[in-house]
Amino acid sequence: MCGIFGFAGRASRPDRDFLKKAVDSFSYRGPDDEGFYLNADSTVGLAHKRLSILDLSAAGHQPMSDESKTRWTVFNGEIYNFLEIKEDLEKDGARFSSTSDTEVLLYAYKKWGSQCVSRFNGMFAFGIYNSKRGKLFLARDRMGKKPLFYALAGGNLVFASELKAILSTGFVPFEVDPSALNFYFALGYAPNDKSMIRGVRKLPPGFSMEFDIASGKAEVKQYWDAPAFEGPHDEDRALEEIEEILVDSVKKRLMSDVPLGAFLSGGIDSSLVVAFMRRVHNGEIKTFSVGFEGSSKNELRYASLVARHFGTTHKEIMVKADMGDLERISGLLDEPIYDNSMLPTYYLCRHTRQDVTVALSGDGGDELFGGYIHYQSADTARRAGKFFFPPLNLLARAVSSRLREGAFGKNTLAGIGMGEKACFTYPTQIFREGERQRLLSTPPGKTELMAPRLFRESLMNAKNYDYINQMCYADIKTFMVDDILVKVDRASMFNSLEVRCPILDYRMAEYSFRHLPGVLKIRGGAKKYLLKKLAGKYLPAALDLERKQGFDIPGDTLGGNKSRVPQRLLDFGPNEFVSRPFIEALARDQISGRGHLWHKIFALYFFLRWLEACRG
Amino acid sequence: MQRVKLLAVMDHLGGGGAEKQFLELVKRLDKSIFDIEVFLTEGAGKRMEEALQCGLKITCTTAKRNTLKALPALINSMRKFEPDVVMAWLSYSITLAAAAAALTGQKRLVFSERNSMEMLFTEEVRFGAIKKFIFKKCLSRAALVVTNSGIVAREFSDLGYAPGSKLKVVRNGIDLETLAHLPAKEALREKLVIPGDGLCGVYVGKLEQRKGLAYLMEALDGINNPSKQFRILGIGTGSMEETLRRHGRIELLGYKPNSIEYIKAADFLLLPSLYEGLPNVVLEALAVGTPVIASRVSGIPEIIEDGVDGLLVGPADAIALRAAMTRFLEDGGLRAKFAANGLKKIREFAMDKMVSSFAQLLLEAASRSPQP
């Protein structure tokens, strides 16, 4: 788990200081080691910050080259099946000098070229410079666990694990992309290959890119996407299959040369991961939980119940949410990614890192198995809309707009009477079209205001899935990759911790889209039907599977003062992007207790704080 | 036999696709069967000249959405002309026609709306919910509601705007005979001064955000084109002109009345819209054998079958758009295959087919007993 940076192009001649400056912008990603590579004529530079997990010796140092010194790589992540690939390569005569997966990556690339990525099972983002062919090859894992930003300009390419490394080089000027801003305030992130900065792009999950240094030509290709639905499996068969995949994916993720543990929230996903860890591992398992003082959503009781059941060494911590921490984290973020569980995740990682370097988590269960309440709301709204008379639809919308954010039924009511796809995409926006029109200082036209949800709706239409799977697919492609996984990556990296997600093994994703119909995900109004069945089989009976779960940023308790964050919104100086009166009204509503607007408040807070940090 | 008196109400005769279809319809309806008067509720528009040359009787207000002026004028027309059927196109004219019909007791109404409700009455439209409600009431007075795409018809029926029995789909038509007389592609390239060596993509339409041009720019940013192996032409005018000009990757040629010649001369057509009705340019491109890359929105998937006669991409998805363009730029065989398939398909969209389907519906409405 590390941070990577690279540069290629004829036009510029980077030196070691240039590379050093770039990786220093994310030094927390790799506290153990750093390394630099410059080719003979300084047209290619690679830099690496290392957090050692596998092969702790100097042999794992990066940038790493093959024995002929023609291919050089910087690699961030893990290839869980590297031993199998290594065996294949050894049969072909490859000789390895280290026990790291990075060396396997190099030889796999040597043998299979750009096709090598489809052989890897893992989370990764890497760059390989092939001096013989004068090309730079970049790739990102299938689910988008590891970040990779890049910018192309004047025939040059720069890439990095974090956007701020690209900005630190001065290669791309700091200029907020107005289109990304519109998407951010609608969704809470900039999706697809968009970034908040004009000219900087993300390489999307499941994509690779080949850059030809001589011509400056870049070719971006998709090597993986969730498969089409091929027909349903029945419940028993499905349970067998997911169990089999989960056993193997947990086993693969237990491979490590450093101490390893697991997050345990007491929810279904993390509890199942711990259950399967117990199944494949006899030794000590360390588990970690975090709870908030004064938070109503305290899951610690359930977590310790699960821990006792599986005999793990369990540590729990009660934290008091601190405004100072929020300020620091939000200032470190390279893009504003609004997420109400950023701070709790950060505390959990900080606490976990005191004992272990790697932790397994339950991420992905909600997206692959239908665990979100917004799936239920949309499905209900879609059905209701067909039966309601239009005047009643209007009434439902009016009632919805009067309900506070997050109130029971608000999203369902808002979706009633909209198109089938809009039932899902419209209510899940942070600021809806009309609100954004007032919020943004220079609002785009009316169709462009709708672009964020039109984009998500088109993802729903992209495959032959049923309605539930359409929503899951749209979330996998947007919400999960650009919000959930970014949150996990940044919160863990700020603490130099590596997080692995066995449920997000690509084989699980493939199986879930290929053979699980929507009714095995949401049935009779109950979420995560299939995972609950699996949980019933393995988790302690006393665990209440139907309770409300998840943790959020305890806005009410932050700093012991309800109005700290909204008050903070008023302290930010004016800027050219968002309307000051709109923000003031919003903050005042929140402070006075008239509104329950935490989603909106935090979306604005993260953006304004990011802008402040970027502009110094 | 007495002719059927038809009052055809439309916003204006501007440069848009719906206006073109409307004009072709009133021009081509058999005058031995129909006695037609056209009423424009908003003003004349670019195609007025053409309409007058065809000898159409036109009443044109200069109301520009001034309902207090337009409504009395329309009522006056209805009283004087005493039509057997009133046909109105698009939401504003439909609303006026419904109001005027209610006041004059006119009951044989055929309304044609081509846009999705969601797009017409978005959240930031003032009093959108009320307007939507009123519009729904207006539609309910019609004997028939005609849309030009299945997707809008489905939406109307799903959301209860019109019952399935009143809903009809008549797809846009295209004038195949005129297009058949266009010069060959190479000759057009010479005439329009498009050099023959590099590939050429063309965008035709208003230069507006709705058309997804921001994503086209984004997509082009990711395709290197140092030695100008290909060029993208933009035909049309609009609010995004300045932004596009600054961006510099799309060569803007302004409004061209002969846009079809550019479409034929080009190697492919781009339509990255966020929203559309049933776009005529896509039909035109198929008819002249130019393969298409378009968004998977609105009625477009009812024309283009992805991977058969064109490539469809998600709206606001610059990556997909870039990938599709790269495929077209690299694979001449694919372009040729799509072009051939498109030429076969386009026969379903002959203009006369559209006109005869519409005529049938109008006659049906005329002879139908007045709605209660």
Image (cartoon, grey):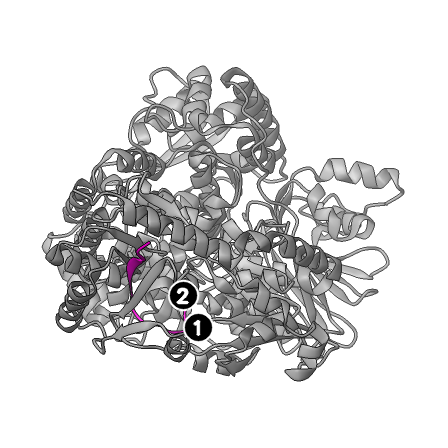
In-image side of B231 versus A397 (left or right): right
Q: Where B297 sits versus B280, above or below?
A: above
Quadrant in the rendering for residue A152: bottom right
- Mark 2: secondary structure: helix
Q: Chain of mark 1?
A: B
Tell me if residue B22 comes above or below residue B147 in the rendering.
below
Q: Position of residue A546 (x, y in %)?
A: 31, 24
Q: For mark 2, what is the residue?
A: B210
Q: Is residue A444 magenta?
A: no
Which is nearer the eye, B197 or B340?
B340
Q: List the residue tagged with mark 1.
A: B206
Magenta segment boundaries in residue numbering: B1-22
Q: Residue at x 58, y 25 (%)?
A: A247
- Residue A394 rendering spot, x and y as whole percentages: 18, 46
Residue A481: which disc? Answer: none
Q: Position of residue B87 (x, y in %)?
A: 29, 58
Residue situated in front as seen by the camera: A605 or A429: A429
Q: Are marks 2 and 1 in contact (CB under 8 Å)?
A: yes
Badge 2 sits on which subunit? Answer: B
Which amino acid type corresponds to the residue marked 2 in the rendered image? Arg
Q: Give the farthest residue toward the front.
A: B1
The local crowd at label 1, few if under 14, some if 14 to 19, many if 20 or more residues have their Cα within 10 Å, is many
